[in-house]
Amino acid sequence: MTNQADFLNSKFPAPKDHGLDTSGHHRYINRELSWLAFNWRVLEEADNWNVPLLERLRFLSISATNLDEFYSVRVAGLRELARSGSNIPAIDGRNPSEQLKLIEVEARRLMKEQQFVLIKLRTEMAKQNITILTAAQAKNHFAYLQKIFLSDVFPIISPLAIDPAHPFPFIPNSGFALALQLERKSDGRSLRALVPVPQQVNRFVRLQGQGSNYLPLEELILMQMGQVFPGYTLTGHCAFSILRDSDLEVEDEAEDLVREFEVALKRRRRGEVIRLKISAGAPEALRNSIMLELNVTENEVVEIDGMIGLSSLTELVVESEPKLVWPDFSPRVPERVIDHEGDMFAAISQKDLLLQHPYETFDMVVRFLQQAASDPNVVAIKQTLYRTSKRSPIVEALCEAAEAGKSVTALVELKARFDEAANIRQSRRLERAGAHVVYGFINLKTHAKISTVVRREGSKLVTYTHYGTGNYHPITAQTYTDVSLFTCDAALGRDATKVFNYLSGYAQPKTLENISISPLSLKSTLLERIASEETNAIKGKPAEIWAKMNSLIDADVIDALYAAGQAGVKINLVIRGICGLRPGVKGLSENIRVKSIIGRFLEHSRIVCFANGNKMPNLKSKVYISSADWMGRNLNRRVETLVEIKNSTVKSQIINQIMAANLADIAQSWIMQHDGTYTRATWPSGKFAFNCHRFFMENASLSGRGSAGAKDVPQLTHSDTMQALPKP
């Protein structure tokens, strides 16, 4: 196991010669296998005794949800490539068929482990009087459960006979159903039937009495089979769920993009089945019938010896069990906003403000737009919307502003995967309110997170701008860590306006002052900054790169990092998910270290710091926040932002608080090995293990301090973090 002190030690661990062909594609890690490694880390948290019991159950649920989406999108896409005969290799040289074989082995191993973890969790839950029962175990509650069934379930289930007069029904993506073998009591005639388990009600029914006893909905239906099929005896049954291809194909020259996506969404609902999960030991006749009707092959079937549909387990994570969930945490309102009595414009005009969510409340982003909507001095609002909540207060504010006669432009991205339908509804609503709704480019997703508010102040117009690393989504902002920059800097306002003009009128900006955007200049800016660090290292100057993101897979960027590291640049990467770079390989990447943080909050912010000829951390460093991960899609096929931070307070906050704390974290960190595996960071028993999430919960952001000043805000330096860590 790797000790986290090694990760921060100024002397990088001695490189090892792993016998790799570092000149070929072996220098990269496969994207899909790296993603599966990430989901293993998520599942490991379900087995982490330092995590509250019901939160461990939540991690199990997340790992199951993640894997389902991975199959519906990534695996579905690879299947299509393989079927078309494509031999186009991935970054590591493997063609689609080769990747699918490896994915299948690893995914089946992962699903088996999920069931094993559930068994352990149920044992621990039982000690806390929380149980998941079967129909047989709940028979003493029959009368109560029958009442619940008849009132809440019976009206919405649709039992479906399967015979020549009743063809096999359509089961939607993620659909869950019971397949039944029945025998009529009067004459012994057999009947096969399906009962789709309704998704409109909770999966688990809580029983009366002491403790927390739950009965899964499918068990309730089996218990009440006499109500569903009166006069029949149940002779065999199984449960099954399916995943369908959820990739979308859109005509490049679609005249009406909204209408095209409405049609495409209907196609998705009827996508080809790519995975059938079925109860182990299912009656052979039922199993064969289901496979035939769904047109799946044996290698697309996974027998589940346990519970199907683990994603529903999140329902059991209830706040009524305070000792078994994370302690309550209330996001802070920045002191400077309080000093200005909640006036966002006054707080921003004093100086730039960087908030880190969820530690500082996302309500400040909502308030920024709500105040803009009601402020008579505001004349225009522009906003990008990639993902947002169903009843979005941001959309409400934009509608209010448009109805008040302000100029409102909303860039709604219709291609935000799995949120397309919601975004169509939001766009229709905005149009009805009088907003200008723009859908951006057909061949590019707009992933940038930008808001501008133009306000009349005296005889001039002032542009207030918000740049974010995360979505304008109040719900996910409660668990995703992201940063929000609020500024009235004129140059940053001009840059934002040019980006909006590019999105709405295809007016490609000739110059940008403080930001870079993909697909035009973001990647080249990154490569130039990496090359500059390489040059400084060659000249004997301090040369370092600190970066934090969700994914790193772009080959050009990886090769640039390899070259910089070989020249002597010290590179520390905090990458939550996919990483195609091999760290710690002699002759290739001995100066590169990679870690992943998996904990209470989902690490989502994208930050990069370049030493710029000065030892890190230093306010002379080049510091950026971004909406983009370092992947081909973000750098080449999306509209993204890379925003340079020039305000000294904000820069100090990013370097000395956010990045330093992430690099210092031990309690939630995993260290990447050269082969793409990860080992949990370790520390001596009884010693302090620094937890960056706890640090951020307990300490206010530097730029958000108000009249109290920033002098008492903890900042972490390299020596500070080393003193806090156990010695190797």
Image (tube, rainbow, N blue to C red):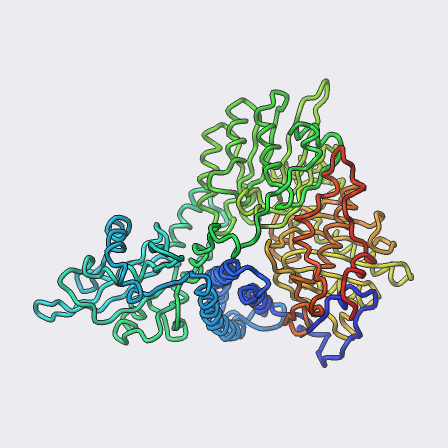
Identified at 65% across, 60% down, the residue is 597
**Is 147 rendered above or below residue 424?**
below
Q: Position of residue 310 (x, y in %)?
A: 43, 62
**Is 337 rendered above or below residue 257?**
above
Q: Residue furthest top?
A: 459
Q: Quadrant of residue 528?
A: bottom right
Q: Residue furthest front?
A: 210
Identified at 87% across, 54% down, the residue is 614
**Is 46 rendered above or below residue 203?**
below
Q: Position of residue 237 (x, y in %)?
A: 27, 69
| Foreground residue among 348 and 405 | 348
| Foreground residue among 548 and 141 | 141
| Foreground residue among 461 and 45 | 45
Q: Position of residue 184 (x, y in %)?
A: 13, 67
Q: Is residue 487 left or right of residue 157?
A: right
Residue 396 seen anywhere in this rendered image of the structure: yes
Image quarter where the N terminus lies is: bottom right
Q: Is residue 516 left or right of residue 218?
A: right
| Foreground residue among 321 and 448 | 321
Identified at 65% across, 64% down, the residue is 579
Q: Is residue 434 left or right of residue 151?
A: right
Disc tally is 0
Image quarter where the C terminus lies is: bottom right
Residue 256 seen anywhere in this rendered image of the structure: no
Q: Quadrant of residue 281?
A: bottom left
Q: Residue furthest left?
A: 187
Q: Residue furthest right?
A: 540
Q: Position of residue 592 (x, y in %)?
A: 76, 66
